[in-house]
Structures are given as C-alpha cells and as structure tokens.
Image: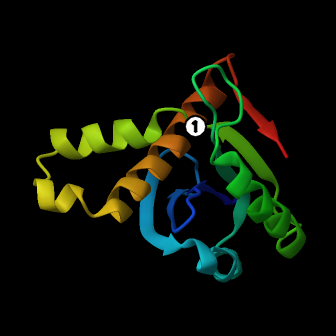
Amino acid sequence: MGRLLAIDYGRKRCGIAVTDILHISANGLPTVRSCDLIQFLKDYASREPVEAFIVGDPKDMHGNPSESARFLTPFLNRLKKEIPEIPVIMFDERFTSSIAHQEMISAGFKKKDREHKGKADEIAAVLILTSYLESRQNSNFNSKPV
C-alpha cells in the first residue's frame, strides 16, 4: 500500500501533504513552486510508493469550476502524461484556504508568520487530504478520478 499525496495547486506555489503508509494521518511537506511540481512529484514517487495523487478541485459556491480551474487543467494534463502509472483523484477543495488561515490564527501564528503564504498552502493540502481520508470512511464519498 502506497502513500496518498495531496496537492493544493496554485499558480505560483503548491501545498503538498502525504499520508503515512496506513492512510491514518496527513502531514504537510514543504511548499513547492508550481513550475517545479512535476519534478518534485517524480522524485518523491521514486523514493516512496505513491498510491494516488489527490488534487484539490477548485469549485465556486454553487459547485461549478472556479476561475482557478483553468490554471489547473494544463497541470493535470502534464501530470497524467509524465506520471501515468499513478492515478489522479480530484477532491473538492472549497474553503480550504480560508480554513487554513483560520487554523493559523487559532494556532497563534503572528500576523507576520500568517503572511507567509506557503504555510497556508501546506495547511490547505493537509485539509484536502484529511477530508479525503474522512470521506472514504463515510458513505458520502465526494471525489472523482480524472
């Protein structure tokens, strides 16, 4: 059984989170620049078994693709071409960025530390992966393979 790796894709940088081998917990990895993401994923998958990529699916309040979805599509196409052996699963990422900022406030991050957007991206990836893991335990499974 391989790890699940979640991606909170952004135009400049991406939050990354991975599970343990048993898929019990999600832990953040350092934020990666978007232009370096494919190489990072290849390198990671060469060192650790990866069962699937869980990619945050950007949606608006009505469940339609959000404006940022147009930036995600080229990445997804390249990911499937460059690493075809690892399935890609889209998972709703609504509210993860705002929840990440709230979590930072609750955890006592100073305003200066909260301005470091890479940390918020990492937390958002952990939230995506944690939500995905929880959804697998519930009958209301909300993901779709790409």
Point out residue 46 in the picture as x, y percentages from the top left corner. 70, 81
Q: Position of residue 102 (x, y in %)?
A: 26, 37
Residue in the foreground of this view, choosing between 70 and 8: 70
| Residue that mark 1 sits on | 133
Quadrant in the rendering for residue 117: bottom left
Q: Position of residue 127 (x, y in %)?
A: 46, 42
Residue 12 % position (x, y): 52, 68
Who is closer to the viewer here, 85 or 92?
A: 92
Three-letter code, disc 1: Leu
Label 1 SS: helix
> Farthest residue toward the top?
139
Judged left or right of residue 121, residue 116 is: left
Residue sitting nearer the eye, 68 or 121 = 68
Q: Is residue 97 left or right of residue 9?
A: left
Image: 45 above or below 23: below
Residue at 24% x, 59% y is 115
Location of the N terminus by quadrant is: bottom right
Residue 138, quarter of the rendered image: top right
Please report the residue visible at 71 percent of the width from the left and 79 percent of the height from the top: 42
* Residue at the spot 58% in from the left edge and 71% down from the top edge: 34
Residue 67 occupies quadrant: top right
